[in-house]
Amino acid sequence: MRQECADEKELDAAEKPSETKADDVVIQVDGLGKCYHIYNNPTDRLKQALVRGRKRYYREFWALQNVSFVVRQGETMGIIGRNGSGKSTLLQLICGTLTPTQGHVNVIGRVAALLELGSGFNPEFSGLENVFLNASLLGLTHEETQEKLDDILAFADIGDFVHQPVKTYSSGMVVRLAFSVMAHVKPAVLVIDEALAVGDIIFQQQCSRKIASLIDDGTMLLFVSHDMNTVKSFCSTGLYLKEGRQAYFGPIQGACEAYFRDFMQIEATEGASDESSRQKQNPNSEPEEAHGVHSDVGRSGTHVGAILGVDIRDETNQRCASVGHGETMNVAVSLKMANIGTATGMAIQLRNKEGLDIAYTDSFLEGLQWTEATGTTATIKWSFRVQLQPGDYVLAVMLSNVINPTTFEVSPIDWIPFAQVLTITPSALPLFGLTRIDADVSIA
């Protein structure tokens, strides 16, 4: 039976879930859901207010439905899912900035949340004024904030900008200050929604150490990110949301596997549909799956040049989608060059089904770089022995220009995170780990 949106009276009268007796429970979510009323035009909203439920002038959209889980003190939970899956809605319900349509959420203790860039900050106030404002919202008195002020400002490290209005800050400075305040109030629950991605790598490492310290002190971390490496490094438990529903809750590795498996199935279906459409438009053309890219999802860069295609072949020079462990794999990447006045490089990377980066190399590291005229095409060929654990992998490719050859700083021209899907099959060679160490060994 389709669920209706509950009105306020129904919510007030609803029976609350039984309390979990465990003393260490920090978050208990029971049958949580959020429904929005979608109106075609503003007058329908007015009509709905006048008829008081006797007639419906809206359609329902369930952003979240039937989500239940329990998280305990000191645990770390990652929430993953595609855009629009309900992640941010769930965080807002937990933080109390949204009211649930159905179900209940119970949070024990102080919640500190970094949901949206600059949320909770008054742009007209100085950074210092916002420190006291945010700390008071999190339950600290003026005196308690004053005691922690030196530590907060030292961690944020924004210098004299702390006396300037927040509206003059860069996005990185806003995150520095917001995170520093939250980290020093020692919350029971720390909620982070992608915001740390805008900080520089040094600050991200500082945040990682601070988060680890908070977890050791008993803080429960609720973390949302599309970076599976970060999620797995921070979190022990995972919640995978799919189209607003709970698809998986359990160990973080299982959540990442479920997400990645579904993602690849969706992309394979969409890719097959696109290929079918191309064949209908041009029935005499040859299939391009061996030369094209698996998916344009996440593709980015300056696009002054372009990756035209990726071709994978085995050691017999046959196009393939699988290679045996210990065998040689040949990757050919066709490019359209750009005359940008600096050295150009090509990188390839393999990720496993959990989304972890497993292997990487680039032409610059291998001693190959070039500068070509605009429009010139070329093919970069790679040949290497596959030394990875059998399983499914994704090949990512990137064309870039080298900004600083000393620090290996590059600017992406064309970055394709899901260029090809590759299966590595088992062999008689034993492998204890993700990859084999290719080394020379001797005895003296």
Image: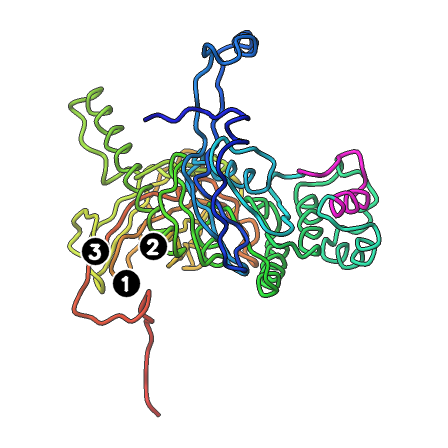
Q: Answer whether residue 130 is magenta in the image.
A: yes
Between 198 and 301, the one nearer to me in the picture: 198
Between 36 and 282, the one nearer to me in the picture: 36
Residue 389, label in figure: 1
Residue 323, label in figure: 3
Labels 1, 3: front one: 1
Task: Give the residues drawn in magenta, as a range.
Answer: 119-136
**Residue marked by disc 2:** 352
Quadrant location of the C terminus in the rendered image: bottom left
SS label for mark 3:
strand
Measured in 3D between alpha carbons, the distance from the residue under mark 3 to the one under mark 2, in whole angstroms, is: 15 Å
Which of the marked residues, 3 or 2, is nearer the chain's N terminus? 3
- Asked if 119 appears above or below 369 in the picture, the reply is above
Quadrant location of the N terminus in the rendered image: top left
Q: Are marks 3 and 2 in contact (CB under 8 Å)?
A: no
Measured in 3D between alpha carbons, the distance from the residue under mark 1 to the one under mark 2, in whole angstroms, is: 9 Å
Which of the marked residues, 1 or 3, is nearer the chain's N terminus? 3
- Asked if 7 appears above or below 385 in the picture, the reply is above
Q: How far across and how far down the image is residue 159, in percent?
A: 79, 51
Going by the numbered disc 2, the residue's amino acid type is: Asn
Which of the marked residues, 1 or 2, is nearer the chain's N terminus? 2
- Asked if 52 appears above or below 154 in the picture, the reply is above
Going by the numbered disc 3, the residue's amino acid type is: Val
SS label for mark 2:
strand
- Asked if 48 appears above or below 253 in the picture, the reply is above
Going by the numbered disc 1, the residue's amino acid type is: Gln
Between 188 and 410, the one nearer to me in the picture: 188
